[in-house]
Image: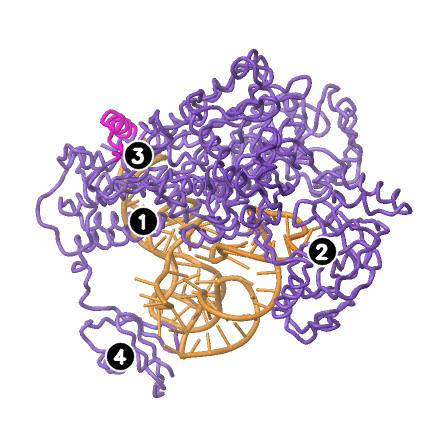
Amino acid sequence: MEYNFREVEKKWQQYWAANKTYKAENQSAKPKYYVLDMFPYPSGAGLHVGHPLGYIASDIFARYKRLKGFNVLHPMGYDSFGLPAEQYAIQTGQHPEITTKTNIARYREQLDKIGFSFDWDREVRTSNPDYYKWTQWIFIQLFNSWYNKKTNKAENISTLISCFESNGFKGTSDDILTGDLEIYHDGFTAEEWKNFSETNKEQVLQQFRLAYLSDTMVNWCPQLGTVLANEEVKDGVSERGGYPVERKLMKQWSLRITAYADRLLNDLEGIDWTESIKEAQRNWIGKSEGTSLKFKVENSSAEVEVFTTRPDTIFGVSFVTLAPEHELVAQITTAAQKKAVDEYVTFAKNRSERERMADVKKITGVFTGAYVIHPFTGKQIPIWIGDYVLAGYGTGAVMAVPGHDSRDYAFAKHFDLPIIEVVAGGDLSKESYDAKEGKLINSDFLNGLEVKEAIKKAIAVIEEKGLGKGKTNFRLRDAIFGRQRYWGEPIPVYYKNGIPHVLKESELPLMLPEVDKYLPTETGEPPLARAKDWKYEGKYEYEYSTMPGWAGSSWYFLRYMDAHNEKTFVSKEAVNYWQNVDLYIGGAEHATGHLLYVRFWTKFLNDLGLIPVIEPAKKLINQGMIQGVSSKIAMKKDISVTGMKIMSTNEKPNDVAGLVFISEDGTQQNVILPNDVRGIFYSQDVLSDKEMTVERPVDINFLIRSIDSNYSSVDLLQLTNWQDDFKSAVYICKKSYFYKGVWYNLSGQKIEKSDDSFIVRHEVEKMSKSKWNVVTPDTMVEQYGADCLRLYEMFLGPLELSKPWNTNGITGVSNFIRKLWRLYHNGDAVNISNEPATKPELKALHKTIKKISSDIENFSFNTSVSNFMICVNELTDLKCNKREILEPLAIIIAPYAPHIAEELWNRLGHSESITYASFPECNESYLVESSFNYPVSFNGKTRFFQEYDLSLTKEQVEKEVLTLEQTQKYLEGKTPKKVIVVHNKIVNIVI
RNA sequence: GCCCAGGUGGUGGAAUUGGUAGACACGCAGGACUUAAAAUCCUGUUAUCAUUGCGAUAGUGCGGGUUCAAGUCCCGCCCCGGGUACCA
């Protein structure tokens, strides 16, 4: 009887669920191991074959660790707040909670079918009040904290208040309190503080709180009706939906992640994450060290402060550029230039982010008419405004050194400003010389110094003269935390006299209220403003924005440790036992979003003494993307057709009746198309000029036959019945066309059938519902079984590589599973012998044990599958049915194919699950060879093989080889110059 | 532009510290079994030349180099994928 995977897989999935086989305990004598997958967002499309890739890998690892005697925590849950469910709610009026529940149920069903060893008792959902209660609680801790630069830790805001009460505040230069943070508040004395109004005090405190309210430039997305964080914006459009994003000044909740910039950067050293992710985070944090420097404005008390990393080039400054939004712009602009400046500032403000990024190359700017005085030469230097200077970085002003900065160079060239050479080594007539190498020239006291020394000296002189001081800047911005959306965690804040107050812990969770519509109010307030009678203590307004999607996922790894605790977000005992994640698997697309925020929150919670770890995950593996193959149908434009030319195609739907073809012999053919034709699609093999076409995706389920890897033919009947605009469309093929289920020849006469195929093009891209190229695991599981899907996804190639999905090799894996089954059976009956195993059998097993162990440790799951195949092939050839071999084999294969392994284990006579068996150790003595078949090569080219006993020394092998008849043949009578013998490896004879 | 990862048969991909390139699998071709098909099993399969057999030559994106020996190390370049984008 053949292996019945349907029955067996179902049986064991039920067994595991009923027996809670994968339940993890919070205490154990065993060492702990925590394997975590990145949270899925349960979208309406369900899981596609790309999702399980990482889950299968982590599941193999988790199962392996259990077999190795570890107490394994391997949980799963859902990141269930978010935009898609809400967008769906807006369209249909259905509560997002219902959509979310349905989607989760579908995910769960799909996950269960693949046989994952999750401890489902620990499932969490970010949208459940018993979960978001603690997300809100952490927000309150952030609100009640400030970052003390002296201790380099977050502390309760009360320590800051007592500092104000005793010492007051010295203003932005109060290093001890502000460090590198930009605090916009004047200094005050202790006495003044005590007399401040509550409002005034809170204004000051908002400058320090880790969760704070401020007027910030935000990424506003009008179509989504919300602000977005920097990493949710890609190329000037929203990551979800692709809607335009504009800059807007709004009062917003933000998190002061910048306080942690240095630690987020430095602590990367201590974690075993992929270098690419670490590098992406380093770039995102963007630390740069330089100096601030003040330039006095001529005939004014104002000063322009700039930030530069190249103070050595101070004598190369030929102008100063301000960002259009710079506060000094209005103040310093001369009357003569006012009009030009105002126009420019308006222009710059109205340009969308998208436009600005699209024409990076386009240089724009205007002269203010004002000048600064060079602090060393005393010369006049013009002040310009340019939008290549960003208001949000540094001081929003730069000292332009066109000789040694390519952006300044481009600006200077464009507006014909002087270019001064101060570092020797470049050719300034062609381009700026940006390298930090060479000797300083034309630079007074810096002349002759190397750039690095000059930087040091310049900073020293600048500081000495009180013109500025050494300073570090980060590219990282504070994270905007409010979203003007419904489906998210309510921010636990209410307003009393305009001052924000947080809720008491006992008042949590602040439940998401019911609303009549999921849209903003008429006055533009977020959806929560629609909630009826939703007021704190019946009178104070709540905050109407909700938290962003990443709030819940910034601490979920902790909740899994203690998922049902009602007293605290995670108990001390649980977190002290589980510490942090040992292995985290997920996509690289979260490099600068989730993975940065979760590190930030972890450090913060550690500062407060709530958890013992400073990093969420010790090791991180990125799985590659499984791409989909979409199929593209061609339409439109003036067409050249192979063998004929279509002359006029005014493709207005009602104007295609008189298509004129010119056939190969040059005669015109007037094709009469019916009047109600609503569109024309072209088979890809009739198009010779791809430039003239546009394409749209069609459902890959309509494909019938693959022509080659780039093209397939499509089922026109299915396509015609698909969507409205396909129903009354004409499908043009080489010799005929298809319309409403009927074929016509090109003269417009009905024909019985056509031997034409309608061809669509393939394209490899991200799997997505909108591209109609999604392949779900369900059909795979149905057809081949979960074990086969698991093995096949691993067999496809290295985990971290992206690859398009194809099922070409699936039969190989399926055959392997059947072959494995047959090894344990003779016909229908289990056939196991208790005889001792032979040497070749033991060798086949133990070399596999060795290989599989090292493969798993190195996350090289694809080679494991190959090695299982080799092992089973060898044992099949040896006709091995010995218990001594087949029992350990079942165990080592169990992490990969748990269902069949359980069944075989059971048939071997075990009543317990294979999950807690112990992984066999490799016995090296079975692998020891007594001889080696040496490849004998001449000048590095292998010619033949010769077997020698391994006890032979190098010298003996050399002597033996030289006596061989074959050797003599290749020597052709010459004497070898040199003979290299590498023991157990190779013989190379140099002639 | 910058940063990161890649480039090996018709395809997915193997290859410890430099040491037999192409494991394993798909596909393809031929064969066995079968009334037939499916399933299964066997043989072959980098290219070119030669072929009765033995074999010869080339070959891991391209061009150089180091070495007895290079897919692997070094230098220069090309191509594809991902990230990032005026960060002073």
Residue identifier under label 4 = A961
Which numbered circle lies on residue A540? none
On the same chain, marks 3 and 2? The answer is yes
Q: Is residue A265 shown left or right of residue A530?
A: left
Asked whether A9 falls inside the magenta stretch, the response is yes
What amino acid type should be assigned to the residue bearing mark 3? Ser
Q: Which residue is mark 1?
A: A856
> Which marked residue is nearer to the observer: mark 4 or mark 2?
2
| Disc 1 residue type (three-letter) | Ile
Q: Colour of chain A?
A: purple
Looking at the rendered structure, the kind of residue marked 2 is Lys
Three-letter residue code for mark 4 = Val
Callout 3: SS: loop
Residue matched to label 2:
A294
- Indicate the quadrant where residue A545 lies: top right
Q: Is residue A503 something that shows in the picture?
A: yes
Q: Position of residue A512 (x, y in %)?
A: 50, 19
- Position of residue A244 measured from the top left corner of the image (x, y, whole percent): 68, 34
Residue occupying the far right of the picture: A336
Of circles 1 and 4, which is in front?
1
Q: Which residue is mark 3?
A: A117
Q: Could you tell whether A875 is left or right of A795 in the image?
A: left
Q: Which residues are magenta?
A: A6-26
Predominant SS of the magenta segment: helix
Residue A710, above or below A979: above
* Model colouring: by chain
Same chain check for tags 2 and 1: yes
